[in-house]
Amino acid sequence: MKFKDYYQTLDLKKDASQDEIKRAYRKLARKFHPDVNKSHDAEEKFKEIGEAYEVLQDPEKRAAYDKFGSNWRAGQDFEPPPNWDAGFEFSGGGFTQADASQFSDFFESLFGKSGGFSHARPDFRSQGTFHARGHDVHAKIVINLEDSYLGAHKTITLSRPVMDQNGHVSTSPHTIALSIPKGIIEGQQIRLEGQGGHGTGQAGNGDLFLEIAFAPHRIFTMEKRDVHLSLPVTPWEAALGATVSVPTLGGTVELKIPPGSQSGKKLRLKGRGLSSTSHSGHQYVTLTIITPEPVTDAQKKLYQQMAQLMPTNPRSGLGV
């Protein structure tokens, strides 16, 4: 997938105002509309213009796109960084164009097929004196696995898009304090009442919904509520059985390895996953047998004795 420079598509500078974006879009859309322009690439060009406008005309999409777009050039191979949108507030979505299915894979990789996180579009203009509840706002935050395992109190700073009187978009920090519920899992949301967009008149504010994502962990991987760990063991620990120390999110515990264990054997530590008041998670430990490299003559002789005393063909099941 190639990176798309939406400013280049609309022949704009990156500091263009929203009015300049609208004028550029209208000019190019008229020029390349398939009903007017009969060149072979007019339809494709028209789609690219519409996609660029879909992003740049929306202050939130534009600010998010600008967040990392400066590190890429048009045509470069591109994959969105994991959780690229973390810490960024969205209240809008929806499409300017009628046929959103024609947007590129690049667009969908950033904003998804729905183009946003809700269906309400933010209004950056004055809304008069009538009463209207503020927009709900959505953001993604990245936490450590330990925050979920134990529960935590955190202060986070989100980026909220703002538009000045000249139509230029920037971001403003929005710092909030919150509690991370014990046992929350990736993809779940925390709702902060009244922390969304400001209401109009006497109406209340909208809510802020924070979607949880997990930072990569050095040794653990996750599958919903269950924690997974690959545990190295020696051949004699696996063959004879042993009690070994195993790290968990809650600290080190002792695990019994049954005699005769093989690589790939999976053992469960009950309740050592992400558990809440109503759901339990566990930790699964997968054994990986690590064979020491013989260096000295005595060590090599020991392996030779093992081969004589315990002859076996681990490939017998392969028919060889």
Image: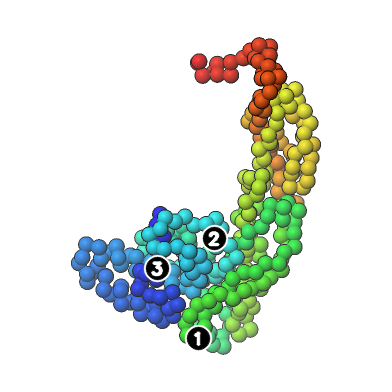
The residue tagged 2 is 84
Residue reaching furthest bottom?
A: 129
Give the residue number, with chain letter if any, for mark 3: 6
- Residue 32 lies in what quarter of the image? bottom left
Give the residue displayed 29% in from the left and 62% down from the top.
44
Q: Amino acid at mark 3?
A: Tyr
Q: Secondary structure at mark 3?
A: helix
> How far apart in space, not on screen, are marks 1 and 2 (Cα)?
29 Å
Q: For mark 1, what is the residue?
A: 165
Q: At which x and y percent is residue 79?
A: 47, 55
Measured Cα–Cα span from mark 2 to mark 3: 18 Å
Which of the two residues, 147 or 100, is positioned nearer the viewer here?
A: 147
Q: State left or right for residue 154 relative to residue 198.
A: right
Which quadrant holds the N terminus? bottom left
Quick one: SS at disc 2?
loop
Q: Residues within 10 Å of mark 2 (few under 14, many from 20)?
A: some
